[in-house]
Image: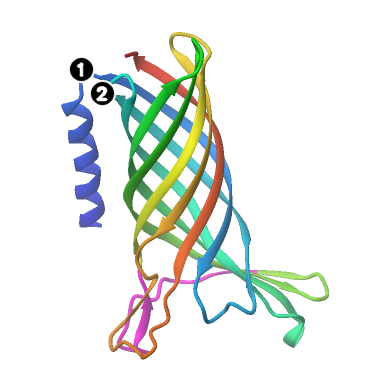
Amino acid sequence: MKKLTLYVLFICISTVSFSNAGFKIGAGVGVSVAKIKEKYYSDRNKNMLAFDVAIPMEIKVARYFAIQPEIHFIQKGFGLKYYGVNGVENIYRKRIYIEMPVNFKFVYPIRDKSFVNAYIGFGVGYALSNKQLTKYSDGQKKKESFPYDNNVDDDNSAYRRYDLILPIGFGYEYKVSSKVSVYADLRWSLDVNNNIRYKVKPDPTPQYYYRNFIFSMGVNFIAKDK
């Protein structure tokens, strides 16, 4: 957790450093299509519907440029097709992360109260939970929670609890009043580190990268306009 704490401290210092800039803080919810990028489950890899809850903050440092630190509670994972083998149709592996990206955003006004934006950023995350949902051919469902396997000594592999992410997206914002705006956002959240680590790397080494395609809507509270 030390790395995560240092990252939070960096965001806070950055916010204070731009104290003369415009500032907004918001809240949003989104629906996500989640999967993993890999090559060993490609014959049965399945998308999974997931959620995203966000607290975005915007530091407007110039007319067309802003820095946007965010806090996300995001569900990641993927589905596996079992085609009725042993009575199992699908298994969904679900993990909830807290993530904190910092986006660098281009903002362009298209009308007096309307804005479009595009951004790219970088961030870190930490896994909070590890769950699995099994759906059977007879319609039954089984939900399970598992501890995170952080021990590479027992079977040479373990899950990586930290992740590094690259968010890329664009959005629309409408200013309802001098203090409130609403927004819609479409983004890709791409993991850039392997979700599995090894004590001794096999050859070839399996690689699992989370991919989330997210549509979000929310509201911003304008503390200081610019």
Q: In this view, does 66 lie above or below 83?
A: above
Q: Mark 1 is on which residue type? A: Asn
Numbered disc total: 2
Image quadrant containing the N terminus = bottom left
The disc label shown at residue 61, or none: 2
Q: Where is residue 77 in the image (x, y as percent from the top left)?
A: 53, 64
Image quadrant containing the C terminus = top left
Q: Provide the residue span drawn in magenta.
A: 143-160
Q: Where is residue 222 in the image (x, y as percent from the top left)?
A: 39, 17
Q: Can residue 19 be spotted in the picture?
A: yes
Mark 2 falls on what kind of element? loop
Q: Where is residue 117 in the image (x, y as percent from the top left)?
A: 44, 30
Q: Which residue is drawn at 39% across and 70% down?
A: 195
Mark closer to the chain start, 2 or 1? 1
Q: Residues within 10 Å of mark 2 (few under 14, many from 20)?
A: some
Foreground residue, 121 or 12?
121
Residue 21 falls in image quadrant = top left
Foreground residue, 135 or 192?
192
Q: Which residue lies furthest to the right in this view?
A: 138
Q: In this view, does 178 lie above or below 11?
A: above
Q: Can residue 93 be spotted in the picture?
A: no
Q: In this view, does 205 lie above or below 12?
A: below
Q: Is 13 included in the stretch rendered in magenta? A: no
Q: Do the residues labelled 2 and 1 touch (CB within 8 Å)?
A: no
Q: Mark 2 is on which residue type? A: Val
Which is the main secondary structure of the residues drawn in magenta?
A: loop
Q: In this view, does 56 lie above or below 95?
A: above
Q: Residue at x 37, y 70 (%)?
A: 194
Find disc 1 in the rendering and name its residue: 20
* Distance of label 2 from label 1 (alpha carbons): 8 Å
216 to the left or right of 107: right
170 to the left or right of 226: right
